[in-house]
Amino acid sequence: MNLYDNAHELAKSLKNSDEYRLFLQAKKLVDTDEQAKKMVKDFLAKQMELEMEMMTGKGQDKAKTAELQKMYELISLNTKARDFMQAHIKFQRVMSDVYKIIGDAVAEGMDFFGKK
């Protein structure tokens, strides 16, 4: 099997995983509730904004972090939004693990710029 066949097999495995199927089910449900969908979208946008700020060296903004925490508390009160976020987090964890496994496998060649 060549590299591209393996990549397609991995994609198929991810698509058929329990985590992805549960994520899609939760997405379908949250899409039926405009309030839940808005809560999730606002939360994810705010979360991404904070992550970008931290990556650019701005540091952690305690007020924005507290706001994000309050948003998550509200999400936890809405069943559809909460279930979506839980499924989203589980699938993101799987994707992160896969990225790490692949990255670790080729890490030796990727340290070119790190060597002096």
Image (cartoon, rainbow, N blue to C red):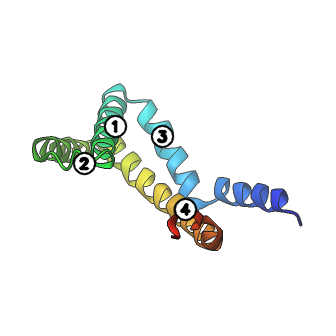
Between 40 and 5, the one lying in front of the other is 5
Q: Mark 4 or 3 closer to N-term?
A: 3
On screen, residue 50 versus residue 22, left or right, reads left
Picture coordinates of residue 54, whole percent (x, y): 27, 48
Q: Residue at x 37, y 30 (%)?
A: 33
> Which comes sooner in the sequence, label 2 or label 3?
3
Q: Quadrant of residue 8?
A: bottom right
Q: Identify which amino acid the numbered label 1 is placed on.
A: Val
Q: Return the residue at label 3.
A: 27
Of the image marks 1 and 3, the number of the one nearer the N terminus: 3
Report which residue position mark 2 lands on.
Answer: 76
Q: Quadrant of the N terminus?
A: bottom right
Question: Viewer-nearest of labels 4 and 3?
Answer: 4
Question: How far apart are labels 1 and 2 at the CA level?
Answer: 10 Å
Q: Amino acid at mark 4?
A: Phe
Left or right: 77 in relation to 107: left
Residue where numbered disc 4 is placed: 113
Residue bearing mark 1: 40
Cα gap from disc 4 to disc 1, whole angstroms: 39 Å
Q: Is residue 2 above or below residue 63?
A: below
List the single residue furthest toward the right: 1
**Position above or below: 84 against 9:** above
**Which residue type does callout 2 highlight?**
Ser
Q: In this rendering, would 113 be left or right of 58?
A: right
The amino acid sitting under disc 3 is Lys
